[in-house]
Amino acid sequence: MTSDDFEEIKVVFAKDLIEVLRDYRTLIVMIIMPVIIYPALLVLPSNIAQHVKHDYKNKRYNICLIGDSSPAIEFFRKAKVLTLTKVLEDGNPDKLLAAHVADIVVTFPQEFTAQLQTIPKQSPRVNIYYDARRDQNLLALAEVRLVLSQLRGKIVQQRLDALGIKTPQKYELTFSELKVENKKSLASEPVRNLLPFMLFTMLAVSIIYPALDVITGERERNTLPLLLMSATKRHNIMYGKCLVVFLIGFSALMIGLSSIYIFIQLAGQRADDLLVMKFPLDALLMCMLISIPLVVTLSSLSILLASWCKTFQQGQGYFVPFLFMAMGASSVCSLPELQLSSGVAFIPVVNTALSLKEVLAGHIDVLWLSISALVTMIFAVYVTYLASTILDSERLLYGVTDSRARRRLSGDYGLEIMLLCFTTFFLMFYVGQTLQGWDIIVGSLFTQVLVILLPAVALLKHLNLPLVKTMSLKAPHPLSFLGALLVTPLCILLSIGVYNLQSQIVPAPEAFTTMFTRLIMDNDKPLWLCLLGIAVAPGICEELLFRGAILGLVRPKLTPLQQCIFVGVLFGLFHMSVFRVAPTGVLGVVLTALTVWTGSIYPSMLVHILNNSAAILMGKYHLEETFVSYWPATVLLGLVGLVLLIKAKPKKSDRLPESLGT
Amino acid sequence: MSLQAIGLTKRFFDSKRGEFNAVQSVSFECSKGEIFGLLGPNGAGKTTTLRMITTILKPTEGTALVNGFDVVKDPRQVRKQLGFVSADTGLYDRLTPREILTYFGKLSKYPKEKLQPRIVEIGNMLQMESFLDSRCEKLSTGMRQKVSIARAIVHDPPVIIMDEPTTGLDVLTSQVLHRFVIQCKEAGKCVVFSSHIMSEAEKLCDRMAIIHNGQVLASGTLEELRAESGMHYLEDIFLNVVKETVSDVR
C-alpha cells in the first residue's frame, strides 16, 4: 500500500462517514438502540424473573377440601404455602374453582376415616382439582402432593405400629446448595451466557443499515457509476467504505456495552446469587477489546453482501439470513467443551465468539487470542477485497449477462460446477446417509453410483460435452500406471501424516478414530464386498466426479496449479468431516496433480482404490503402525514412482485439452 | 486525436430477445477543441457506447483510445482523462454541492491547494453560488444538473463525455449548459455529446454520427451530411437515414 492508497481510502471514508451520519436511521441504530433497547433487553428479563420468583416465594394458595377430610386437615393447615379456606362435606370443585373461592380443591371419599381403619378392596381415591392454565397453580399442586404423601406416611406408620413392626431410625439429611463462582471469572454466569448473543445481535443490527447505505445505496441512487469512473482503485473504495461500517458498528457496540454496564450497575445488583448480573469495568474493557476483530469481520461480510444487492429492498432480504447467522454464531459460546485452542481460532467469527466466552470466564490465553484476532483481520481484508471485485459487475450495474451458450463456449462453467457440487452434497447428505444407514457396504456402493457418478454423467450429457474427453478417459503411458502404483504408499503415508498433524490442532474424538475400524470389523460382509463398496466403487465413481467431471469443467478457466488446489479442496470438503478435511484434501490435490500430469484419469483411480483398500486392510488387521515403521522404503518407492511419472510425461499433443468442445 | 472509438461492439443477452448487439462496430474520432455529436433515438446504443468509453462497460469487441490510453488495457489512466455528465446519474443527497465537488476533486487527485479556488470558479461559471452549500436533496432538477456538470469537470479533464445532458431541463438551464459546452470547446477540450434533440446537435456539434440499432449509419460535419442527403435540416437528414435502414430491414 502506498500513501496514495491511504489517501484514497481516507477520502472515501471521510465522505461516506459524513453522509451516513447525516441519516437519522444510522443514528437510531448507532445511538438510540444501544442506549435504551439493548441494555433493557439484557437486564429486564433478569429483573422480571427476579420479581416473578419473589412473587412465587411469597404467594399463598387458597385450598378447599371436600368430603371426609378430617385425617388430612391437620397436614393442610401446617402446609407453608397453602391457606385452608373451606372444608365442605359436599360440593362441586369446578364451581369453586370458577368462582375463585379456591386455587386448588381436594376431594376425599365420604367415609375416608373409616376406610383407613380397614384394608378396603379398592384404594381410597383422593382427587385434586386445579386450573392448569395458571402456571402458579403448579406450585400449589406440588405442595398438595407433598401434604398427601405426609398423610400416606402417617397412615403407613400407624399400620406398622398396629402390627407391632418397628421401623428403622430415621436419618434427617440436610441439603444446602453452595454455589462456587470462578474467582477469575470477569462476569457472572447470566452475563456470560447472554452477553455474546446480545453483542452479536447488536453488532449485526448496527452494521446492516450503514453497509446497505454506502454500497447498495450508491447503486440504487445511481451514484456508483460516477464513483467507478473516477481514477480511484476499486479496493480502496471498498476499504474506505468498510472502515465507515466498522466505525459505526464499533461505536454502536461501545455505546451498547457502556449502557449495559451502567444499567447493570444501577439495576442488576439487587438480585440473589442465581440471577446476579455482575459486569465490572474490567469485563467491559475486555469485551470492547475482544470485539474489535468481530466488528471488522462482520463489517467486511456485510460489505460483501451489500455489494451483491441491487436495491435496498433486495438488501433487506439478503440481510435477514445474515442477521440470523450472526446471532447463531454466538451460540458456540454455549458449547461447554469448545475451547479457543482447539483449532477454532482459525475460523473467523466463531473464534471471536469463543474468545469472548473465554475472556469473560477468566481464561485469557494471549497466544490463541492473538492468533484468533490475526486470522480474523486477514479474513476481513480478503473479504473486503473480494467485495471490491463485485462492485463494478456489469450484471449488478446494468443487468448485463452473457447467454448460457456463450458462457459455455468461453469455458465458463462456474454455475454448472456450483449446481453439481450442491446437488452431490445435498444427495450425499440425505440419500447417501440414508442408504449407508440401511447397509454401510451395499449402501456405499449404491451411493457411489447413484449420488456421485450419476449426477456428474447426467450434467456432462446435458451440456453435450464428450464424456471421454472431459473426463480424461484415455489410456496413459504404461509407465504412468507403474509410477502411480509405486507412489501409492507415499500417498497413504502423506494422508496419515497430515491426519496426525491436523489432530494436533483439531483432535478427533475417540469415537471418530475407531469408527472406520468398527465399521469394517462389526459387519458380517465378506472382505471382497467391503473392498468393492468402500475402495473400488469410490475409487472409480469419486474419481469420475472430481478428476473427471469437475476437473474437466474447470480446466478451461484455471491454471494447472489452481486446478489441483480447487479440485483438491472440494474433494476434502466433500468428505463432510472437519477431522478428515485436511488429509482427504491433500490426497485430492495429489490425485488431481496425477491426472493433470498424466493426462488420464486411470492412474488416479488406481491410487484412490489402493489407498482406500489399504485403509480397510490396515483397519482390519491393525497394520497402521507397521506400515508407518517402513516409511524409508515407502519414500524410496515413492521417489522411484515419481521418476517414472516424470519419464512418462505425455507429449504436448497428448495432454489434457483446455477447450472441451461439444 | 483525443478520443478514438475503434469498432466498439457490445453484445447483450436477454431471455426474451436472446443475444443481440446493442452496439456494433462503432467507430468515430474526436479531437481537442471539437464537439462531436452522437445522435440517435432512444435505445440506439448511444449510452452503451459512452459507457464503454467511460470504462463502466467492457467492450465485447473493439476498443477506444482516450488521450492515447486504451479503455480495455489501461482503464485507470482513461478515467483520469474523463469527465462524464448524464441526465440520469445521481447525486449524494445528504451532501452539499461543495462537498461533492471536493470529494470528486480529491478522488481525481486534483491539487489540494487549487481545489477550493477551482470550485469557486466552476460555481461562478455555472451560476451555482447561491446553492453551493445547500444539501442536494433540496435542489431543483436544473440545479442538480449543474452540480452534475460541475462534478464532471472539477478535475479539469481533457475529455468530456455528455450523455443527453439536457434531458428534463428547462430552456434557461439548457442555455447555461449549451454555453458551458461551447466554453469547453474554446478551452480546447474534446467533447462528445449524445442527444436525440436535433436542434441542439445542429447548434453545438462540429461533427456528428447518426447511430441507430447500434450502428453508425452516417457521420461527418453538418455540411457533409447535407451534401450527402440533399436535405437542409438535420432532423430531415436524420429521419431519412433512419428510414432507409428501416426499409432495408423490411
Image (cartoon, coloured by chain):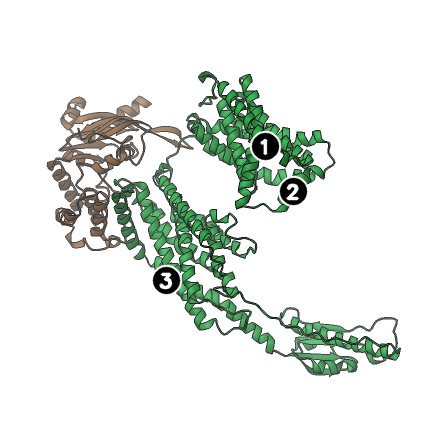
Chain colours: A green, B brown
Q: CA distance from mark 2 to mark 1?
A: 26 Å
Sequence-wise, the earlier of marks 2 and 3 is 3
On screen, B233 above or below A358? above
Q: Position of residue A619 (x, y in %)?
A: 66, 36
Measured from the top left, where is residue A265 in percent x and y?
Answer: 44, 71
Q: Amino acid at mark 1?
A: Ile
> Element type at marker 3?
helix
Question: Which of these two is toward me, A73 or A443?
Answer: A443
**Callout 2, which amino acid?**
Thr
Task: Give percent across and percent down for residue A363.
Answer: 49, 58
Is residue A384 among what the camera can see?
yes
Residue at mark 2:
A514
User: For this view, does A101 lie left or right of residue A149?
Assistant: left
Q: What chain is tagged by disc 1?
A: A
- Mark 1–mark 3 Cα distance, whole angstroms, equals 52 Å
Q: Nearer the viewer, mark 2 or mark 1?
A: 2
> Secondary structure under badge 2?
loop
- Distance, label 2 to label 3, CA atoms, is 54 Å
Q: Nearer the N terminus, badge 2 or badge 1?
A: 1
- Mark 3 — residue? A31
Q: Residue at x 62, y 69 (%)?
A: A135
Give the chain of mark 3: A
- Labels 2, 1: one chain: yes
Amino acid, disc 3: Ile
